Amino acid sequence: MTLLLFAVLAYLLGSISFALVASWVFKLPDPRTYGSKNPGATNVLRSGKKAAAVLTLLGDAGKGWLAVFLAQTYAPQWGLGDEAVAVAALAVFLGHVFPVFLRFQGGKGVATAVGVLLGLNLWLGLLAMATWLTVAMIWRVSSLSALVAAILTPLYGIGLLGFEAGTLAVSAMSLLLIWRHQSNIINLLAGKEGRIGEKKSPE
């Protein structure tokens, strides 16, 4: 029951959409109405308001880190171990991707995944970020950066964490990230995927 409580609380935290929060703060259109219609930092950037995109990025990453931090802090007090941290890590990510507050239509989870990784292991998070940034600087395509990072991060996890509950959570997140990027993969193969910072007119 306690493990379920950790999962529910992490899921609800993950369900908070900072794309919508940032859009409300900066009086921008709902990010689900323009560009890729994805409530995430990359799409908010298409509004032309960089500060809103930064707030979205920090908020979405921050909730991922916070869920893991709280689980690491309080799980031992409830007689729980690494499994509670892994459950919270996966639950906060699922909350972002399938948020109850947005009828289960959320973002793709890249920023939240990064926050989770930083919470689980600083070097794991930094390696994932370095992978994303390297690909982004070369090709300037956010989805490609996310896909490459998603493919490599479980390998980083095995090297840094070993075969433990946290690694399983990381692997599950990576698989979900790849699945959430199905349309981007199609666009990439067709050469139609948008580049970072590219504006799209509202549809």
Image: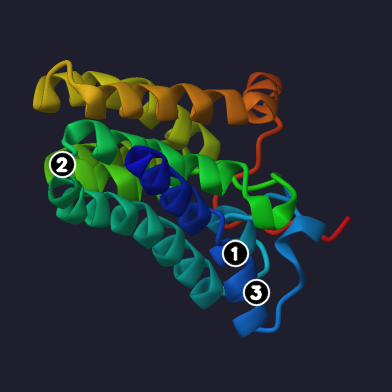
Identity, as a three-letter code, of the amino acid under mark 1: Ala
The residue at 56%/55% (across/down) is 15
Q: What residue does disc 1 label?
A: 19
- Residue 154 spot, x, y in % from top left: 29, 22
Identity, as a three-letter code, of the amino acid under mark 3: Ser
Q: What residue does disc 3 label?
A: 23
Among numbered discs 1 and 2, the one appearing first in the sequence:
1
- Residue 169 spot, x, y in % from top left: 34, 28
Q: Is residue 97 above or below residue 55?
A: above
Q: Are marks 3 and 1 in contact (CB under 8 Å)?
A: yes
Q: Please count the marks in the image.
A: 3
Task: Report helix, strand or loop for mark 3.
Answer: helix
Q: Is 177 positioned to the left or the right of 2 in the image?
A: right
Whether residue 141 is visible, yes or no, is: no
Nearest to the observer: residue 164 or residue 8? 8
Write down the quadrant of residue 52 in the picture: bottom right
The residue at 38%/39% (across/down) is 1
The residue at 18%/34% (across/down) is 82
Q: Is 176 positioned to the left or the right of 199 in the image?
A: left
Identity, as a three-letter code, of the amino acid under mark 2: Gly
Q: What whole-number distance in Å separates the C-alpha atoms at marks 2 and 3?
A: 40 Å
Task: Report helix, strand or loop for mark 1.
Answer: helix
Among numbered discs 2 and 3, the one appearing first in the sequence:
3
Viewer-nearest of labels 1 and 2?
A: 2
- Crowdedness near tag 3: few (<14), some (14–19) or many (≥20) residues, C-alpha within 10 Å: many
